[in-house]
Image (spheres, coloured by chain):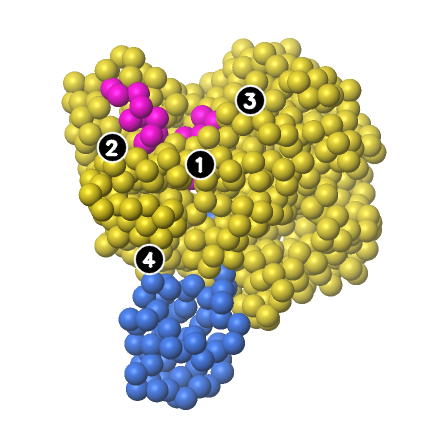
Chain colours: A blue, B yellow
Amino acid sequence: MIHVDDSPLEWQADMTVASLLAQLEDTGFVSVVRLNGRLVSSPQFDKTPVPDNAVIRLLPLVAGG
Amino acid sequence: MGHISLTQVLSTSYEPAEVRKGYTDKSLHINLTDSQIHINPIDEAIKTKFIGGKGYDLWLMWNAVTSDTCWNDPENPICISSGPLGGTPGYPGGGKSIVTSISPSTGAPIDSNVGGYFGPYKKFSGFDAIQIDGKAKEETVVLIDGIENTIKLFHASDLPEDAYEMSAALTQHFDPEKPVNVSVVTAGPGAANTNFGCLNFSWWDSGRKRVRYKQAGRGGIGTVFADKNIKALVARYGTISMKANAPADPEGLKKVTKAHAKGITALDHKQNRMSLVGTTHIVPIMNDHDCLPVNNFKFGHHPEGKLIGEEAFELIFDKGFDGCWRGCAVACAHGVKDFTPFTGPYKGKKVFVDGPEYETCAGCGSNLGILDAHTVLEINFYCDAYGLDTISVGTSIGFVMECFEAGQITLKQTGMDLSFGNRPNALALIHQMAAGEGFGAIVGKGIRQMKAIFAQDFGADPAFLEDIGMESKGLEFSEYITKESLAQQGGYGLALKGPQHDEAWLIFLDMVHNFMPSFEDKAEALHWFPMFRTWFGLCGLCKLPWNDIVPEDNKTTPEPAKVMKHVGWYADFYTAVTGREATPDSLITMSEAVYNFQRIFNLKMGYGTREHDTVPYRAVGPVTQEEYVSRAQRYDDQLTDKYGKDISGMDTAAKMAVLREKREEQYELLKDAVYKRRGWNANGIPTIETVKRLGIDFPEVMDVLKANGVS
């Protein structure tokens, strides 16, 4: 089980950040997530595995300084 | 803290204007040449059109300068205003000051939005705006005392030189019992010796029992301040509550303040965690997306980029409340205690550093090839203490380092190795800049002047310098790589004051998400976003609470980038304080009038046309073969897929030439689209129809347009 923005979701063995986002709605603006507290940016989404029990936050659209 | 002595040369009592619905309807004019003080009314027509903040500042400036006024002429004023909403305790980002002057860097109006308590204290003392002009014969301290209702001028000859010590000393001097009542504006010794001096605005940190600082950094207003022989501006005021602005609808204000603050408190720790890391979270994000400036904006990524980002600073920042305004829930103004510099006058001593923010990490870190948090902190500390803008310092030194490595300048001129990554010499250069000595005295003139000096006196290649010198309109770029975002190239190049990101930050909407594929889409964004961001400067607010922490359901709204729920709250906020009914659309119209007025002000000063909206090619595409080769696949693909070119048989130089032609063509087409959307002609000048629609068709404005062929 993982938690995405406080909602539980079933974990899958080969899950990446990219495959996780593909399952979710309204993620078109997501270019950065926090995976267990660490920032992960979109260029790394498809090569970043999501471990079981992960806590993921979908960060808002990056708005600059 | 040693005793200081000030010699009072003028004291004037005044009847304080009552604050009503966010306004005092008075401005304070101080002429330093003859020590004259005048309190002037602000009439309803000006209030309606210019709103406050930057709008008031620009109006005062317009009437104070002629088209021939230079930054160091006595008539060039420094204006400070906080806007009708400024000074609302508890509203996130609700205490900003907006400072303007004719810039030493650009020759045109510059504006800077800064935290600290000065702006609200000034307003509650009775003045929506202050205008300071003339030049003092001796070093002068100005006190606006809203508790005793007096304005005093002092001559001072033995004040501490650096901004930190001076503000602390004056805070203790003017209210030793209640230092929270005092806010001090200072520059620092470096401001007098460079063209990019900043102003430090203070507030008293009750938790740490020390003076803290935010900076009005851009465009050299600190240099103007020093040229006027002002050592400090001091505002003193007492208790502030939600009633201080005498809002038209106290219950409405309470409701919207609570809603926004509650949202920030509930969501910041789930999103960007700015209350813990400030804006340093942006460093790794930009680095991962190839947008972090590395080695004078050559590249957008460094393998060690995270060493100067949130992972480092979360551990280093001192824990505690860090709001630069009372009760701000974002509370992002972090600092580092017990920091020990390894160079300069504070070498080996423990100091408190206010910062760094993202721009300083990027500009004074990766852009110099320095991936070391300690050095970034030391540069941050000395820039603030000396009164130097960290953005212009970082971007200028990056330029110098590339010139050095490219052989455009040599040890003969610099006197020191200025290769990228040379930490001790980067710091040595800053000490020189502050003192106006050695090669640092040249660097302190800024990139535009350095380009001329390097070409004329040192035999450097002027075309190369034009390509790599990251300035536009004379102002050094802030710290984002824009090569792959045409919209952000416009965000910088079409910004009124020069390439600062506070008008528009569209990189992710454009480059990452491709949500604005057409020129018209980009032009629409380069209309709405600059207008809405301008509104914060009119009202005395910070933009961070708008779109850096967003409602959880924002992603399901039609236009998530605009965060319309928050825009609606800002309209409610404005209505509750001023009693004037506002909507999200009317906020844009308010800004549009002031924005176009500022464009015409640029025109009045000899700028404000298409030719001045250019950007160096380094902002648009790869200048050197090294850059092209480092992202060869990206550029090759664009040439073939986007532009339909057959690149077989073309060497790198040939491919670079074709890419440059195409990209520069795109930038010109973008200008056309944006000018059209903004209601400007092909030369970038507002049309008669536009100024009439916005109600800024004053006779003086029409005269400027007519003189520039628009009638």
Would you name the residue on which mark 3 appears? Answer: B607
Numbered disc 3: what chain? B
Would you name the residue on which mark 4 appears? Answer: B288
Numbered disc 4: what chain? B
User: Does residue A31 appear in this view?
Assistant: yes
Q: CA distance from mark 2 to mark 3?
A: 29 Å
Would you name the residue on which mark 2 appears? Answer: B402
Q: CA distance from mark 4 to mark 2?
A: 23 Å
Residue extent of the magenta highlight: B460-480
Residue depicted at 35% across the width and 87% down the height: A12
Which badge, 1 or 3, is on the more N-terminal residue? 3
Expressed as whole percent of the image width and height from the top left, the position of residue B657 reads: 30, 35
Res A35 → quadrant: bottom left
Residue mark closest to the camera, 1 vs 2: 1
Expressed as whole percent of the image width and height from the top left, the position of residue B578 reads: 79, 47
Left or right, B469 with reference to B201 = left
Residue depicted at 56% across the width and 68% down the height: B555
Q: Is residue A57 above or below residue B633?
A: below
Residue type pointed to by label 3: Tyr
Residue mark closest to the camera, 1 vs 4: 1
| Residue B469 colored in magenta in the image | yes
Give the crowd class for mark 4: few <14, some 14-19, many >=20 residues within 10 Å: many
Would you name the residue on which mark 1 appears? Answer: B665
Which badge, 4 or 2, is on the more N-terminal residue? 4
Q: Secondary structure at mark 3?
A: loop
Q: CA distance from mark 1 to mark 3?
A: 22 Å
Q: Label 3 near label 1: C-beta < 8 Å?
A: no
Frontmost residue, B357 versus B316: B357
Left or right, B627 with reference to A37 = left
Q: CA distance from mark 1 to mark 4?
A: 28 Å
| Residue B623 colored in magenta in the image | no
